[in-house]
Image (tube, grey):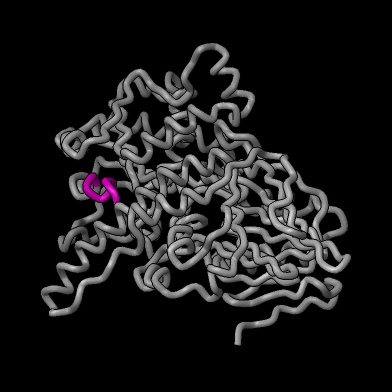
Amino acid sequence: MRIEFWGAAQEVTGACFLLRCGHQQLLVDCGLIQGRRRDELRNREPFPFDPATVDAVVLTHAHLDHSGRLPLLVKAGFRGKIYTHRASRDLCEVLLHDAAYLARHDAEIDNRKRARKGLPPEEPLFTAADAEQALRHFRGLDYDERRQILPGVEIRLRDAGHILGSAIVEVWLSEGGLTRKLVFSGDLGHRGTPMLRDPAVIDTADLVVMESTYGDREHRSWESTWAELAEIFTASRASRGNILIPAFAVGRTQELLYSFHRHYDEWGLDRWQVFLDSPMAIQATDLYRRHRDLFDQEAAAMLARGEDPLNLPNLQLTPRPEDSMAINRIRAGAIVIAGSGMCEGGRIRHHFKHNIWREHTQVLLVGFQAAGTLGRRLVDGVRRIRLWGETIEVRARIHTIGGLSAHAGQQELYDWYAGFAGRPPVSLVHGEQDAMAALAARLQGELGAPVFQPRHGASLDLAQPWQKWKLAEQK
């Protein structure tokens, strides 16, 4: 009985954890590695285990850093079932097909460069057909339903409050009369996140595998965040500029629309043109409406009154490229929500090209910006950026709206772990090293928690009493 850490180990992306129990092998998440180009090239490397021997996958949620290598897993020989919440299955249909489109587009650009150098072409990371094949393996579950999925393996999904369908995964492994319960946090939501419920509290585990994205910092209060946004919208309207909001198509975009609906009069949004400039975000928003049974009490009350909490009187959807290009003729009074969330691709870069050099432009960074991304460079105060070979001055005002994060802050992570009886061992994953170390120090110092910080390829022998557990490093 063993757990192996093959992704999100002392880094933020690429979640991938392999459980071995008797003759069964279960994978929890299989995500893309994102960030710098050299990091993303690791997605092309073979899996460090044989996908054909994996019996099942449990997916915590649809974001690509958790789901994005599933098409590669199937292509490499996986034949089992992929268990996830039914809403995550629907969102993956959107996200994986979009990722396949981007992979094809990137390959076309790279192959033109390779041709000029006399190099042979490369295939896309995966295709739309690969994505479709992976989706055939999905099986949708509901929250709070305990199910045996393999001999000696039971699972239950609990609401993680991160995005629609996001799950904390409880796993029971049984072998030779011994049972171990593992709890995977997935990505834990920020308490009070608009529209979604707060993360479920779990009280028992033999091992907790917990994210640490914001393990070294707190978010601003919701009250301060709403006040900050109100001030930005008021000041920007007076200065006659545009507001650009890079946002993840799934999760952050819908939270923004909900917040705009809720504060529409207070923030004076009737004086703006609001554009949702992302075909994928438009599709995802429709899926949120389809799964409205997962909304929190406040959003449910809006629906009961006949309101659409994801709509605005002045919201314009721009799925077609020509609609998107037309936005760039607007010199002032536009709020543009567009992907990608870390500014590494998508339509937001075109809007940067037309606006970021203008001093009246405001850029609102409303999500986590991984090291090496354009979004992180903007957070760090870069004054020039390069887009399509052109150097562009950054004269826009850059705002980091940390209070809108979909991830739990340090105190929320601490409180969630503190809900477990008996202080079980905790393995920290899905965080940069400084964030992970800060959270580890607090859990150890204040709660006496046994904390592991596994490196890529490390493993734990779960058959031993936890007091004898020691991380075995990859040879």
Q: Which x, y percent locates residue 219?
A: 57, 47
- Residue 290 on the magenta segment: no
In this picture, residue 198 sits left or right of residue 463:
left
- Image position of 37 with respect to 101: above or below: below
The stretch in magenta equals: 346-351
Seen at 49% across and 32% down, the residue is 288
In this picture, residue 400 sits left or right of residue 154:
left
Seen at 40% across and 43% down, the residue is 94
The N terminus sits in image quarter: bottom right
Of all residues, the one furthest to the left in this rendering is: 116
Identify which residue, 246 or 460, lies in the foreground.
460
In this picture, residue 147 sits left or right of residue 377:
right
Of all residues, the one furthest to the top in this rendering is: 305
Q: Which x, y percent locates residue 160?
A: 64, 44
The count of marks equals 0
Seen at 82% across and 65% down, the residue is 448
Q: Main secondary structure of the magenta part?
A: helix
Q: Is residue 306 visible?
A: yes
Identify which residue, 235 or 327, lies in the foreground.
327
- Image position of 319 with respect to 310: above or below: below
Q: Which x, y percent locates residue 344?
A: 33, 56
**Residue 162: which quarter of the image?**
top right
Seen at 54% across and 37% down, the residue is 224
The C terminus sits in image quarter: bottom right
In this picture, residue 90 sits left or right of residue 124:
right
**Residue 37: which quarter of the image?**
bottom left
Q: Is residue 433 visible?
A: no
Identify which residue, 356 or 8, lies in the foreground.
8
**Residue 386: which quarter of the image?**
bottom left
Q: Which x, y percent locates residue 135?
A: 47, 49
